[in-house]
Structure formats: C-alpha cells, structure tokens
Image (tube, coloured by chain):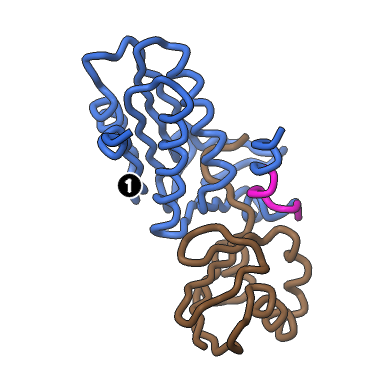
Amino acid sequence: MSDTPTRILCKITQGPINMQELSDFVADPGAGAMTTFVGTTRNTNDGRHVIRLEYECYPGMAEKEMTKIAAEALARWPILKIAMIHRLGQVDIGEASVAIAVSSGHRHAAFEACHYAINQLKETVPIWKKELYEGGELWIGSQTGTTGSLQRVQEEDRA
Amino acid sequence: MRIKLRYFASLRERLGKSEEVREVPAGATIETVWEMLKRERPDLAVVERSIAFAVAQEYVDKTHALQDNDELAFIPPVSGGCYV
C-alpha cells in the first residue's frame, strides 16, 4: 500500500518508553480497537534472581528489521496502524523494554497482529539482552547453542 | 579487498572488540572470513552453529560473496523483548 510508511512507527530508544507516543500514533478515526503489548523486566528467570537487564542492538539494522515486521503485519491483517518501540541500555525490574501498539477496525486483527509482531521481533531483530542476576551475568539466547533463531523463523514460515 | 567486520553482544565480549577492518582475498565469501577468524581464535568453533550473518544490514547465508567495502556483521542469537 502506498501510504504504508505513514502507518508504521518503529524506533529504538535509549530512555524509558513513552506509551502515550505509541497510542497517539496508532489512534485513527476508523479504529474500533487498539491493542498494546508491553514487555517488562521480570525479577526471576530460570531459577535466577534477576537484578536488571541490559540491551544492545545493531543500530540501523534493528529499526530496519522492525519495520519489515510491521509491514508484514499490515499486509497480513486488516489493521490501520502499528507502532513498535524497543529500549536499549539498562532496564530495571518492572520497567518496559519493548512496547507494541496496533489499531484496527475490529479487535481480532489488532490482537493477532500484535501477537505476531512481538513473536517476530524476538526472532529476527538484532537486539540482545544481558541478564544480570545474583551471582553472575548471562547473554540470553547465547547459552543454548541452537542452530540460530533466523533458521527457526524460516522453518515456521514454511510450516 | 577491505571488509568491515562487526561483532555484537556475546561475540563482542568474547573477541574483546566491536569492529575491525580486514583485508580479505578477492572472491571471499562469509565462510572464508569466518574460517580466517577461526584459525586465529579456535574457540569460535563453540559458537559457530548459533551465529547468523548480515551484509549491508540484511541477513545472508555464509556462502554470500563479499564485495570491497562491505560491512559484515556477526549476529549471535537475538534476544530482544522481555522473557519468553
């Protein structure tokens, strides 16, 4: 769709996420639904007591991959607008690291597209988090030695 | 030809640097560069199966042929968002 860029907001931020910015962006007179997802830092993970998370990204590519996901969501569901924001740096317990907002005429599409967007973000966007826990630190995702998240996404797409 | 290499997250910490410029032979693929790095750092074999590659900020596979002045990024398993 020719107006696709005006229906997508994807950004990386160094400071706290401003939810109002996402809500304002996706607001639309044609919307009957707006869904939001907020991912926050939990105080436990895999039996470890988490102190905080630290995020880094591949600047430029991270925004590009997020924009691809948003464009895919617009192509797959009858949604109006989509906004995705990811925070970098230190994120303390209870604070938001990622937020997604989607508007649509009817709620079903907004729920589905929002769910899709967060799942894809976790698989393809070059963002990494280091968990600082009591007794150590760990890059999440790197400890498993799997065959790579991108390949997994491609397999899911084929399924 | 000259290639800019970028390392992130666990790989950056393992190698102790975030980027460098390398001279590689004409016709080199990503695999050529990876093997070159592995000869210097045999411990890279441990992470080999989990690393993805991007050239000019697009995912490509290791058979991708490099061009002069390309930026090649080594991408450890990504983990954006909150916990699963």
Chain to which mark 1 belongs: A
Q: Residue at x 38, y 40 (%)?
A: A85
Q: Colour of chain A?
A: blue
Which range is magenta?
A145-152
Query: Circle 1 sits on which residue?
Result: A15
Q: Quadrant of residue A45?
A: top right
Q: Quadrant of residue B30?
A: bottom right
Q: Is residue A47 above or below residue A124?
A: above
Q: Residue at x 57, y 53 (%)?
A: A130
Q: Nearer the viewer, residue A149 or B10?
A: A149
Q: Is residue A157 above or below residue B22?
A: above
- Bin the neighbour count of mark 1 within 10 Å (Cα to Cα): few under 14, some 14-19, many 20 and up: few
Q: How many badges with numbers are in the image? A: 1
- From the viewer's perspective, is A120 left or right of A143? left
Q: Secondary structure at mark 1?
A: loop
Q: Nearer the viewer, residue B36 or B47?
A: B36
Q: Nearer the viewer, residue A142 or A119?
A: A119
Q: Is residue B13 above or below residue A16?
A: below
Q: Colour of chain B?
A: brown
Q: Is residue A47 magenta?
A: no
Residue type at the position of mark 1: Gly
- Residue A118 locus on image (x, y percent): 51, 33
